[in-house]
Image (cartoon, helix red, strand yellow):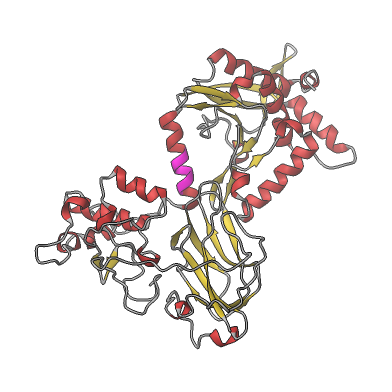
């Protein structure tokens, strides 16, 4: 007898609590194999293909493309075992999981499906997960039709977070635990004095999503008061929705109480773009940074690279040579290979160099990390830079390849600009910027000549060192660029 198993969005690692559905790779009724990718999701770190740990027939999907789901929310259900073919639906029910939940708990004598174990962080497949029923308080407003699935994206109004039939959904306060998984949702509510017990979530089993909180806050702001002070039960026992419903239309258009002018476009700050915005804003808030820069004659460095590439063997990239110079400079000035522990009020110096480098992709700016860059030669660095760059452009970087950096190299010269004042990649302490290398008039050996000149800039956290250390680091980098033989003394 076939079992219907529910596959939930797994823990994607690195503290990520939610992901956006980018593209479904399977349809309802498709037969999937164990570990077959079924959906492509985007987190704040990377694009990830999620494999399904069960083999069988897909009976339901939860969430449309573009929807955000918290970790632990259902992704799809799969009928496994004998008779699974009988679970093929006549038509795609969309995100309605009512039929899929018919086989909630297999009997004690029924065989459980074996999984592969080759899965992501936070869940295993050695046996089917136990299904637990959630008991909803009777006083909670549901907003979902009886017998329908919890995703509800297929019915009118159900796919809009925090609304039911065009109205803001506010539930009566209830006792007991609040159905919230994401710490981000709790923090957002706490910072805005919003009582989560007075909201009904639009997620599975009434789960409160970030969109529910944001919608309630926009509606309350449009009305001129906090959502926690404008909601609550009427004396007659009905839910007070009228106050928020009056402003739901205005809040749905964008910012509180103001419509978007014709021709203007609102672009949500989410996914990679949202993560970059949050990190840059945090860096500006927390890091007292300063920038110093210097022009350097890169003629000899370019000649050295040309000589290296003229020989047989793999070609050496310019960024790999710059990375090799960076690691040598950090060995001399370890203050810049550090971070500040604000809670302990301590500077933490690293004994390794995990070198990040800025890479522009169609999805936005990402910073892949070369692990143990200090232990790699120019050839190994070239290979790793090429691998990570290709993975970044294809959206295949893992969260682990985008985190853990201790210092960042930013080659903005590829954009045709000479200089910049980089923003430190929080929580690191410094970033080296490299402009374009162009022919310029330069005094060389006492005579005016045309040389290949580059501008180098260093932005650093002034808490970890003073200007003398930062200037010494940058001067050493410039000396290695001008005379690559200087680097040989440190090898």
The residue at 63%/45% (across/down) is: 401
The residue at 66%/23% (across/down) is: 330
* Percent coordinates x, y for residue 50 in the rendering: 59, 62
Give the quadrant of residue 396: bottom right
How many tags in the picture?
0
Check residue 412 for magenta coloring.
no
| Furthest residue toward left | 235
Check residue 278 for magenta coloring.
yes
Image quarter in which the N terminus is found: bottom right
The residue at 66%/73% (across/down) is: 33
Nearer to the camera, 192 or 470: 192
Helix, strand or loop for the magenta stretch, by majority: helix
Give the quadrant of residue 152: bottom left
Using the image, determine if residue 230 lies above or below residue 290.
below
* Percent coordinates x, y for residue 54 in the rendering: 61, 71
* Percent coordinates x, y for residue 207 in the rendering: 37, 61
Image quarter in which the C terminus is found: top right
- Regarding residue 265, the answer to whether it shows in the image is no
Nearer to the camera, 376 or 202: 202
* Percent coordinates x, y for residue 104 in the rendering: 47, 76
- Regarding residue 486, the answer to whether it shows in the image is yes
| Furthest residue toward front | 108
Nearer to the camera, 66 or 74: 74
Give the quadrant of residue 412: top right
Using the image, determine if residue 197 lies above or below residue 340.
below
> In the image, is 213 to the left or to the right of 289?
left
Q: Which region shows up in magenta? A: 274-279
> In the image, is 348 to the left or to the right of 176?
right
> In the image, is 216 to the left or to the right of 336?
left
| Furthest residue toward top | 446
The residue at 58%/57% (across/down) is: 48
């Amino acid at each position: 007898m076939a079992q219907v198993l529910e596959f939930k969005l797994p823990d994607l690692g690195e503290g990520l609590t939610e992901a956006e559905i980018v593209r479904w790779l399977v349809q309802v009724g498709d037969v999937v194999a164990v570990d077959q990718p079924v959906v492509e999701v985007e987190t704040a770190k990377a694009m990830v293909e999620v494999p399904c740990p069960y083999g069988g027939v897909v009976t339901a999907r939860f969430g449309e493309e573009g929807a955000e789901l918290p970790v632990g929310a259902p992704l799809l259900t799969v009928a496994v075992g004998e008779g699974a073919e009988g679970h093929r639906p006549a038509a795609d029910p969309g995100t309605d999981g009512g039929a899929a939940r018919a086989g909630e708990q297999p009997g004690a004598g029924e065989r459980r499906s074996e999984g592969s174990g080759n899965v992501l962080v936070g869940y295993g497949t050695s046996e089917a997960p136990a299904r637990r029923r959630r008991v909803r308080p009777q006083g909670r407003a549901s907003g979902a039709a009886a017998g329908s699935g919890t995703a509800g994206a297929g019915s009118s109004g159900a796919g809009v977070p925090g609304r039911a039939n065009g109205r803001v959904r506010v539930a009566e306060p209830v006792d007991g635990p609040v159905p919230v998984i994401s710490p981000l949702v709790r923090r957002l509510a706490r910072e805005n004095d919003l009582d989560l017990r007075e909201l009904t979530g639009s997620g599975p089993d009434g789960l409160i999503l970030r969109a529910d909180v944001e919608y309630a806050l926009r509606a309350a702001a449009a009305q001129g008061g906090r959502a926690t002070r404008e909601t609550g039960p009427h004396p007659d026992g009905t839910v007070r929705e009228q106050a928020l419903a009056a402003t739901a239309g205005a809040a749905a258009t964008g910012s509180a109480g103001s419509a978007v002018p014709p021709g203007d476009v609102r672009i949500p700050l989410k996914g990679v773009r949202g993560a970059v915005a949050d990190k840059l804003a945090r860096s500006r808030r927390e890091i007292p940074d300063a920038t110093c820069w210097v022009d350097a004659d890169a003629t000899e460095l370019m000649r050295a690279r040309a000589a290296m590439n003229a020989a047989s063997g793999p070609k050496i990239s310019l960024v790999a040579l710059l990375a090799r110079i960076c690691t040598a400079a950090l060995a001399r000035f370890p203050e810049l290979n550090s971070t500040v522990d604000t809670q302990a009020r301590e500077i933490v110096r690293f004994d390794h160099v995990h070198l990040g480098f800025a890479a522009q992709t169609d999805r936005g700016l990402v910073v892949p990390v070369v692990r143990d860059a200090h232990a790699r030669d120019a050839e190994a660095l070239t290979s790793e830079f090429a691998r990570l760059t290709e993975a970044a452009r294809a959206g295949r970087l893992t969260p682990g390849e985008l985190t853990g950096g201790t210092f960042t190299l930013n080659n903005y010269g590829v954009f045709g600009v000479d200089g910049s004042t980089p923003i430190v990649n929080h929580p690191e302490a410094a970033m080296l910027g490299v402009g374009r290398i162009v022919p310029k008039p330069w005094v060389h050996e006492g005579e005016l000549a045309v040389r290949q000149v580059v501008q180098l800039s260093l932005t650093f956290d002034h808490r970890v060192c003073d200007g003398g250390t930062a200037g010494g680091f940058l001067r050493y980098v410039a000396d290695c660029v001008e005379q690559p033989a200087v680097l040989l003394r440190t090898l």
